[in-house]
């Protein structure tokens, strides 16, 4: 039946194929005899014209193709050039402009798969190029014109993660007039940036620059904050995502709570405050920090003893212990993932004694000690005896650039340690500060100057990794053993406080979220972008974009920049209002389908659904990968323009050359 | 940083924050392994584990363990322990924020001693106390402690003052001293009220586990039938016997009332519900409600009723 169809379509018009071969400067012509390929190509069946050109992707090259389409009334076009991932879209646009269906162009990859890999075998490369071209011609003869699918895009966006990246993306989108649903798993937005004291290298107060943005989010009617919530399920496709969000109970009604704080005063239970990295206490009913958004208190039900003192003192009667987890469903056009990071947990690295020795702390913990809003009010003290330390050491690359933990560079630790060293100098001018590093990476704007400033102020940088740390059991001081690789001597130093500059690791929920959103992760565990250079905010799923550290370690300016970029990407889709979906999708022949549903279990994109006795393809979700067609036992699934017939025709041509030994 | 230390003498839980230290100290010598704390703990952090008997075949106290992850140092166990075995401290000070913030009541240990009526030379109460909490001292007219009564002259003896010191925070109010006192000097009201009953059909013969474990001498006794009997007069309803009893339902214990300072607290309601029964808490709330209604009626009518 399939055969009949294609015959029917092909019969009325005779095939007229044009073959265009690109030199790509010397990239292709350097090892392939293009002229010979042209000569051979012109002898292939139904080929009306065969030509070569230096750069077919140039305007002049495209004009040539368009001209020939008109002149020779071509109805199939073969472009033998670079990989289709680079220029297939260019040539599709080109033939479309000339009035041809854009799916009637075929790209034969004679650069990446031929000239580059066989650069030193010009004869064989040329033969292979001829084969590849012939195969393309064979397949092109069987191609069918396809209609692109257009889907409308809802003008709303889901932003996952309320750190600085999520905040920036939400604000940008809201300003452009789109509805934004900002989901944050913690009770307040703000993320890690809210925990920092100062920011490098400008030394702005972190909260002072963040809180205006948080307030702007709170007051923007277009932004719907869903704090204390988690994304549970996402279905649908670009322009039409259905998102199920679980809102965890706060046991406080947000519409009634006025943030007066009387409940906290009455609460008898004190537990370690996560916001202060568990260095200071908070109550069982709490607000993580004074500038929190939304300004609503939360009952930590795991710690609450339910004495209901807070209920008694609450003026607006906002406290409601009967709250249950709530399920919210929103429909959005686009999604931005800004899930950020977790600081590396150094308790596994025994050589540094974190968790064993009192006076070994992490960089983020030290950040809270330095902060005026922290548990000590900004006074630097060490845990063992609460005295001011005079000798402080930093160890760099803890959980970064280390084969045992994470091989990547976390990009922020060199600078945050330098910033913390300068802050110590401000508060304890006679402090002796050592920084043990492998390489000091001061690559950003103003970083090198910042590093120089720290050196000028007397911070000592020692190039060498600390091998081991011991504690003097009496004084609780720490003895560090290291090698100074610049001087070639071993160093032993006693310090009062040791700060581990821990790196950044993907947020603990990343793996789960990947499953929900069908995203992929790189080997480092961070979310993978569509192209490392040209599409750093896109993912392979249409309509889902990345922002901030979720995609890889970044400092604040980079996170903000990427967030604005991702917002812009989402905004382009939503402004246009519709998206084109590739037409090369799966198609099911219902007469052949045995309803075994193997295809549904195979589909990695959830594009197949069983609906009232039939299997349906959700074309907007289908990526045309062919997994279902390969698995189908009754051959009921056809991949448009990758039919068995087309592929066999191509293969036959490849084998012909082997047989005849051409 | 969290820390847990378990020795023969004590179980110590510690939560060290940079600016605050929370510590829970359970004195294993004072602890009788009764049920009170483990029943009352709002986070269910306290567990009792039955122990095998000693080589001599004597019953052993259940092992008590507190889950460091669940414990949030609220101090409810400290407040409720009838034997004063648990102390919760913050930065070394014995501060109970549940009491301070009025989110949990304190036990009332109502012990009245009118030592003016005490006969000189009488140390009945001191000897009777099963927990050695009473100390009788004699003071001269100028307040000096007399070491040896025989060294005094008759005149001096006439002016002597008797002082009876009772370690209240460790006293479970068993009333033994009250009954032993020949002059009716001591008046004790029980803190825990209830009902205890030995199911004689189920109580195994020759088993004296409960008797061996009971910290209050005389609350349980071996009858002529070689079976354990209860003297409800002295029982403090702590439940230590029930913990070690090897037979289900051989010992029945029901707490009905606990004397406490007046409070409005959900945490207390829940604790009472677990220590006594939902019925008791209903009664308590109802009593509170009717007292309140009474008060408001009186206020409006400017009339003083009989109940008040």
Image: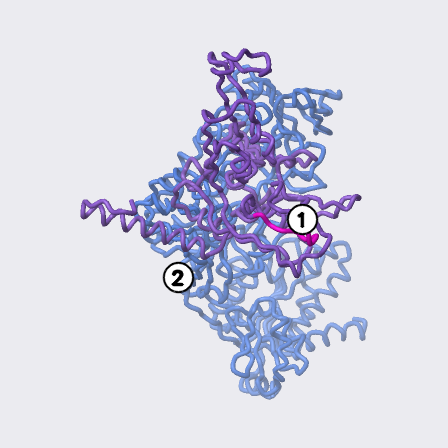
Chain colours: A blue, B purple
Q: Residue furthest left?
A: B301
Q: Mark 1 points at which residue?
A: B222
* Residue in the image at 75% along x and 20% along y: A489
| Residue extent of the magenta highlight | B224-231
The correct choice, above or below, for B181 with respect to A528 in the image is: above
Magenta residues, dominant SS class:
loop
User: Mark 2 against mark 1, which lies toward the viewer?
Assistant: 1
Residue A655 % position (x, y): 76, 74
Q: In the image, is residue A524 above or below residue A651? A: above
Residue A234 can be seen, yes or no: yes
Helix, strand or loop status at disc 2: helix
Q: Mark 2 points at which residue?
A: A576
**Is residue A164 visible in this depiction of the protein?**
no
Horizontal and vertical percent position of residue A152: 41, 67
Q: Is residue A627 left or right of residue A257?
A: right
Tell me the chain of label 1.
Answer: B
């Amino acid at each position: 039946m399939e055969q009949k169809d294609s015959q029917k379509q092909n019969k009325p018009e005779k095939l007229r194929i044009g073959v265009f071969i690109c030199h790509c400067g010397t990239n292709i012509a350097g090892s392939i005899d293009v002229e010979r390929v042209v000569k051979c190509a012109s002898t292939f069946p139904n080929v009306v014209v065969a030509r070569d050109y230096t750069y077919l992707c140039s305007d002049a090259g495209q004009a040539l193709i368009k001209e020939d389409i008109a002149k020779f009334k071509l109805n199939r076009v073969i472009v033998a050039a670079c990989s289709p991932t680079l220029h297939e879209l260019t040539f599709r646009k080109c033939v479309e402009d000339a009035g041809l269906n854009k799916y009637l162009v075929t790209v034969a990859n004679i650069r990446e798969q031929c000239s580059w890999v066989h650069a030193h075998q010009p004869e064989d490369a040329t033969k292979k190029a001829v084969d590849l071209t012939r195969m393309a011609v064979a397949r092109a003869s069987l191609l069918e014109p396809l209609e692109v699918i257009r889907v409308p895009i809802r003008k709303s966006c889901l932003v996952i993660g309320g750190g600085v990246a999520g905040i920036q993306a939400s604000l940008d989108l809201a300003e452009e007039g789109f509805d934004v649903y900002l989901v944050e798993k913690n009770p307040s937005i703000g993320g890690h940036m809210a925990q920092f004291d100062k920011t490098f290298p400008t030394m702005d107060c972190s909260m002072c620059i963040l809180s205006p943005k948080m307030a702007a989010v709170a007051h923007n009617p277009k932004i719907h904050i869903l704090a204390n919530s988690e994304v549970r399920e996402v279905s649908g496709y670009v322009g039409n995502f259905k998102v199920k969000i679980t809102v965890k109970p706060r046991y406080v009604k947000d519409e009634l709570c006025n943030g007066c704080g009387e409940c906290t005063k009455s609460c008898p239970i004190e537990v370690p405050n996560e916001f202060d990295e568990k260095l200071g206490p908070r109550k069982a009913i709490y607000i993580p920090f004074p500038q929190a958004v939304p300004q609503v208190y939360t009952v930590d039900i795991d710690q609450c003893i339910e004495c209901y003192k807070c209920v008694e003192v609450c003026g607006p009667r906002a406290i409601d212990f009967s709250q249950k987890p709530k399920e919210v469903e929103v429909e959005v056009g686009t999604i931005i993932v800004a899930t950020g990071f977790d600081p590396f947990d150094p308790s596994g690295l025994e050589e540094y004694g974190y968790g064993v020795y009192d006076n070994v702390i992490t960089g983020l913990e030290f950040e809270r000690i330095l902060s005026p809003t922290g548990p000590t009010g900004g006074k630097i003290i060490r845990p063992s005896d609460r005295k001011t330390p005079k000798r402080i050491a930093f160890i760099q690359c803890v959980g970064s650039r280390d084969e045992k933990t994470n091989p990547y560079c976390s990009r922020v630790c060199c600078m945050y340690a330098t910033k913390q060293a300068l802050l110590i100098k401000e508060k304890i001018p006679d402090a002796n500060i050592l920084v043990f590093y492998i390489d000091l990476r001061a690559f950003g704007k103003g970083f090198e100057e910042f590093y120089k400033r720290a050196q000028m102020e007397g911070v000592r940088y020692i190039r060498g990794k600390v091998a081991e740390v011991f504690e003097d059991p009496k004084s609780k001081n720490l003895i560090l053993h290291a090698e100074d690789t610049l001087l070639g001597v071993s160093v032993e130093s006693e310090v009062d406080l040791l700060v581990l500059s821990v790196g950044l690791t993907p947020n603990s929920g990343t793996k789960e979220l990947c499953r929900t959103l069908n995203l992929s992760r790189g080997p480092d565990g961070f979310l993978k972008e569509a192209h490392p250079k040209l599409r750093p905010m896109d993912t392979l799923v249409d309509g889902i974009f990345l922002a901030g550290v979720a995609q890889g370690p970044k400092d604040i300016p980079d996170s903000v920049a990427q967030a604005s970029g991702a917002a812009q990407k989402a905004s382009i889709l939503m402004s246009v209002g519709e998206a084109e979906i590739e037409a090369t999708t799966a198609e099911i022949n219902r007469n052949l389908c045995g309803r075994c549903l193997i295809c549904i279990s195979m589909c990695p994109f959830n594009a197949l659904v069983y609906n009232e006795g039939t299997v349906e393809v959700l074309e907007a979700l289908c990526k045309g990968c062919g997994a279902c067609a390969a698995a189908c036992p009754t051959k009921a699934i056809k991949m448009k323009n990758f039919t068995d017939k087309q592929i066999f025709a191509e293969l036959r041509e490849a084998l012909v050359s082997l047989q005849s030994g051409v | 940083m969290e820390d847990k230390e378990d020795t023969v003498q004590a179980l110590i839980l510690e939560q060290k924050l940079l600016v605050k230290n929370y510590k829970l100290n359970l004195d294993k010598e004072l602890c009788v392994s009764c049920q009170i704390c483990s029943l009352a703990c709002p986070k269910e952090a306290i567990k009792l584990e039955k122990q095998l008997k000693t080589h001599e075949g004597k019953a052993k106290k259940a092992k008590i363990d507190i889950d460091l992850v669940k414990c949030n140092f609220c101090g409810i166990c400290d407040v409720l322990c009838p034997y004063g075995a648990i102390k919760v401290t913050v930065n070394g000070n014995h501060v109970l924020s549940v009491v301070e913030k009025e989110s949990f009541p304190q036990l009332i240990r109502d012990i009245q001693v009118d030592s003016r009526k005490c006969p000189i030379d009488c140390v009945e109460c001191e000897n009777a106390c099963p927990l050695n909490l009473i100390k009788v001292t004699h003071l001269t007219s100028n307040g000096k402690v007399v070491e040896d009564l025989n060294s005094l002259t008759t005149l001096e003896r006439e002016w002597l003052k008797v002082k009876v010191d009772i370690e209240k925070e460790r006293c479970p109010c068993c009333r033994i001293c009250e009954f032993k006192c020949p002059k009716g000097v001591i008046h004790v009201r029980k803190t825990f009220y209830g009902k205890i009953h030995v199911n004689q059909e189920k109580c195994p013969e020759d088993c004296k586990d409960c008797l061996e474990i009971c910290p209050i001498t005389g609350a349980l006794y071996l009858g002529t039938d070689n079976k354990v009997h209860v003297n409800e007069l002295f029982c403090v309803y702590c439940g230590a016997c029930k913990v070690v009893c090897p037979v289900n339902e051989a010992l029945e214990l029901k707490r009905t009332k606990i004397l406490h300072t007046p409070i409005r607290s959900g945490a207390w309601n829940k604790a009472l519900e677990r220590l006594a029964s939902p019925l008791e808490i209903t009664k308590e709330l109802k009593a509170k409600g009717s007292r309140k209604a009474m008060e408001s009626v009186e206020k409006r009518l400017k009339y003083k009723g009989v109940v008040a």
